[in-house]
Amino acid sequence: MEKLKIGIAGYGKMGQIREKTIQESKEARVTGIYDVENHEHSDNKRKLCNSYQELLDSDVDAVVISVYVNAAAEYAIKALNAGKHVFCEKPPCINSREMQKVIEAEKASKKVLKYGFNHRFHYSVMEAKKLVDDGGMGKLLWMRGIYGKAGSIDFHQNWRNYKNYSGGGILLDQGVHMLDLFRYFYAGEFECLSSCLTKSYWKTEFEDNAFLILKSKNDNVVATLHSTANQWKHKFLLELTFEHGYINLDGILSSTRSYVPETLIVGRREFEDITFAMGKPKETTTFFENDKSWELELDEFVGAIRGVSPILNGTSNDALEIMKITDKVYSNLENCIG
């Protein structure tokens, strides 16, 4: 079967990661690249386009969009209208209004649209999902997520911290991954009860800390999130507590290896007698050394294009529901301190 021809719009860090994954795939190849800056390529099999329209006018079957957030919706709509399948990085856009317009274009085009909520494809997350879906842990009671990075000496100068490019701070850049996982494990929607954004350290236009309290719309599952750009030791931790025990996702593999180790910790509730909880249950810890999330994510996208299976992760509805939450948080900027 002929490989799918994929174009890349936006050739920064994520565009280069996606290119490498595609080029190593047996199902697809990169045939065109467009970036606002003129990047050189040693491989002349990939056409360096002078404009996004030139990329769309080429014979690509699909487009990977990894541009500034303020342009993501526009790029997605143009690609869909041009009859191209679309894979778009997160965050999907600036707000839910933009996302609605993308969904309208998706429906009209009948093309595949997928968003890069990559963490669902990590092995620890997939194994945890199996445990949750098995039902043996009982009812989900609450979730608590911490996602923190240290930034860098020039973090305040990064494009993600400028309103004209990013549309939001650490919540929109990194915290949306945790919001996606909340929805993934609960299999339902949340509303934001309370939020607080702070500019604690970095002198930026947006928050460097976001504190959220969420509640499920159909019952009383509560999830709390702390997304931060001044966690001086990188940290990823998602705690899920159930009737019969708990699941902790501690650490996640990344290109920098700064959030490792990636572990899955499972504990079962124990009582010493009918009145006293032991509080020290036995745990099993599984370590994960391989990260195939980029490849698995691409496989789902290609499979949907070929009609083998639908998009189950990173759908346009996933993106829309997350943007509804961030809309509410950013609409209450009087809660921003600093």
Image (cartoon, helix red, strand yellow):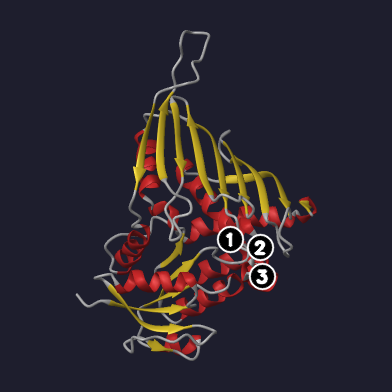
* Residue 30 visible to the viewer: yes
Note whether 176 is above or below 68 in the view shown. Answer: above
The mark closer to the camera, 2 or 3, is: 3
Residue at position x 46%, y 63% in the image: 115
Note whether 325 is above or below 8 in the view shown. Answer: above
Residue neighbourhood size for the residue with mark 2, other residues' Cα within 10 Å, grouped as few (<14), some (14–19), many (≥20): many
Q: Is residue 79 left or right of residue 3?
A: right
Q: Secondary structure at mark 3?
A: helix
Dot 1 or dot 2: first in sequence order is 2
Residue at position x 55%, y 59% in the image: 320
- The three-letter code of the residue at mark 1 reads Asp
* Residue 133: image tag: none
Q: Secondary structure at mark 2?
A: loop
Q: Secondary structure at mark 1?
A: helix
Identify the residue position indicated by label 3 in the image.
157
Mark 2 and mark 3: Cα distance apart in space: 14 Å
Residue neighbourhood size for the residue with mark 1, other residues' Cα within 10 Å, grouped as few (<14), some (14–19), many (≥20): some
* Residue 168: image tag: 2
Identify the residue position indicated by label 1 in the image.
173
Mark 1 and mark 2: Cα distance apart in space: 7 Å
Mark 3 and mark 1: Cα distance apart in space: 15 Å
Residue 324 lies, in percent from the top left, at 61, 55
- The three-letter code of the residue at mark 3 reads Gln
Q: Are marks 1 and 2 in contact (CB under 8 Å)?
A: yes
Q: Dividing the image into 4 quarters, which one contains the C terminus? A: bottom right
Residue at position x 46%, y 14% in the image: 271
* Residue 110 visible to the viewer: no
- The three-letter code of the residue at mark 2 reads Gly
The mark closer to the camera, 3 or 1, is: 3
Residue at position x 38%, y 74% in the image: 19
